[in-house]
Amino acid sequence: MAGANGAATPLTTTGGVPLASFPAAPLVDALRATAADGAPRRVVLADGGNTLEAEVCRARDGRLFVALGYPGADEFEPLRDLARQMAGIVDTGAILDILCEAAAAQCDASGAAVLKAIRSEGEVVAAIGSLAVSKGRRFPLAGSLAREVIRTRDIVRVDDFLGSPRPLRGAVPELRVGPVLLAPLVAHDTMLGVLAVARDIGAPTFTAREAHRLRVIADHAALAFWKAELLEQAQAADRAKSRFLATVSHELRTPLTALAGYGELLADQVIGPLSESQLDVLERMRAVTQHLSVVIEEVLTFSSLEGGHETVRPTDFLAADLLRATAAVVEPLARQKHLAFHAAVPDEAIRMTSDVDKIRQVLVNLAGNAVKFTEKGSICLSLERRDGDVAFLVTDTGIGIAKDNLERLFQPFAQLDAGLTRRHGGTGLGLYISRRLAELLGGRIEVESEPGKGTRFALVLPRD
């Protein structure tokens, strides 16, 4: 190597040790042997307390390549970094892209790809570099390298892909690569796919060390890939559930609306006079119809929230007016149970800008729960100003909630006590919906409770 003044500059290792200080004989012998039979070889060179590892391999055109490194060096630290990086990603597409980039870099390849088996065909689901032209292409599995990897669950290597009559070559005639190395992606005894790396035509073949490195990469990636696929399947099932609930709820709401309308006609005695006993039965029917309507609305709101379709429609209003409107709905329910009911409205007017319908829905739900789970005592609605926020408070003297169960309250379909839920009714969605709506409005729900002494819920929202 020539220096700035034209003089020869001795080559050194990254540790500053001149290469010339290591004995050349073992390396020369390895070069001669690899030149003769083409098999890669690894030798360790020693110079006193310094050691250097050399790997010799031969390309198709006869050129010899030497890779140098320190024995015992932690060459797999980048692989551990890769595992940590993929562990934080749940999107399979992103994982596959990162996997291809890492495989190409770690194996000194010009391209990388991930292949999956789909019945009798294979498909290239991700690809970069010299293999990018194959992305999205399908090919017959029979006779393919991918089929061999799937069958053996082991590393497969081809030194001249262009010269081999493989199905992928026929499906992608513009693919121009030389040496190819493939490893299985297996997690929990499930074959997820095949990881492949390739080099350009005339490049050296992949060494045993690179084959081992690709296998380690594949093993790390397979677990992350498997978890991401499970999560995506769960999310798809959750979306299907939400669509089903929304469809069924819409189908139920249409005849229910007609039923409620006929009930109103009968109650108003438009069709003809009714006796006292008939009016009593009709009132019970109307109560059941109203309860069913509330259940359906809860399911529809749940489906809308899960699908991300709920939107905020802000308007200006007085907090006290909203509190009075909530009290008008809940007070009759409290009086039916002979509960004392009180709405404390402050003298100071508090003006807000938010979605009044969503706030009313949350408050009616919180206050309705207070009535439902209070057998004796009182229910109180009140307001508090908190810096830039407004707190709507619902306080009861009901059964209370144990501290360990407070967070479970807000889980969908959660039931703290199956007996209580069955006795009082409900879908188990009300508090979950209330918290989601509060968050949608930029607020939160706070809860304080003590078993046997009652509960206080606070809906805290920004004034603007």
Image: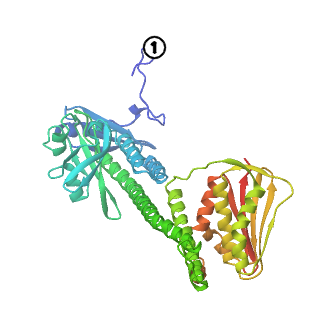
In the rendered view, tell whether residue 297 sits above or below residue 388: below
Seen from the viewer's position, the closer of residues 183 and 230 is 230
In the rendered view, tell whether residue 189 sits above or below residue 134: below
**In the picture provided, is 166 more to the left or to the right than 93?**
left
Task: Count neighbours of disc 1 (C-alpha within 10 A) and say few if under 14, some if 14 to 19, many if 20 or more.
Answer: few
In the rendered view, tell whether residue 249 sits above or below residue 123: below
Q: Position of residue 287 (x, y in %)?
A: 59, 75
Whether residue 295 is visible, yes or no, is: no
Q: Which quadrant is home to the N terminus?
A: top left
| Residue located at (61% from left, 84% from top) | 276
| Residue located at (70% from left, 79% from top) | 336
| Residue located at (41% from left, 34% from top) | 21
Residue farthest top in this picture: 5
**In the picture provided, is 277 more to the left or to the right than 392?**
left
Q: Position of residue 409 (x, y in %)?
A: 62, 70
Seen from the viewer's position, the closer of residues 310 and 77 is 310
Q: How is the image coloured?
A: rainbow
| Residue assigned mark 1 | 5
Asked which secondary structure carries label 1, the reply is loop
**In the picture provided, is 270 more to the left or to the right than 17?**
right
Residue farthest bottom in this picture: 277
Seen from the viewer's position, the closer of residues 210 and 41 is 210
Q: Position of residue 45 (x, y in %)?
A: 36, 42
Residue farthest left in this picture: 165
Amino acid on which disc 1 is placed? Asn
Seen from the viewer's position, the closer of residues 157 and 372 is 372
**In the picture provided, is 148 more to the left or to the right than 228?**
left
Q: Position of residue 445 (x, y in %)?
A: 68, 62
Q: Based on the displayed image, in which of its 4 quarters is residue 174 positioned?
A: top left
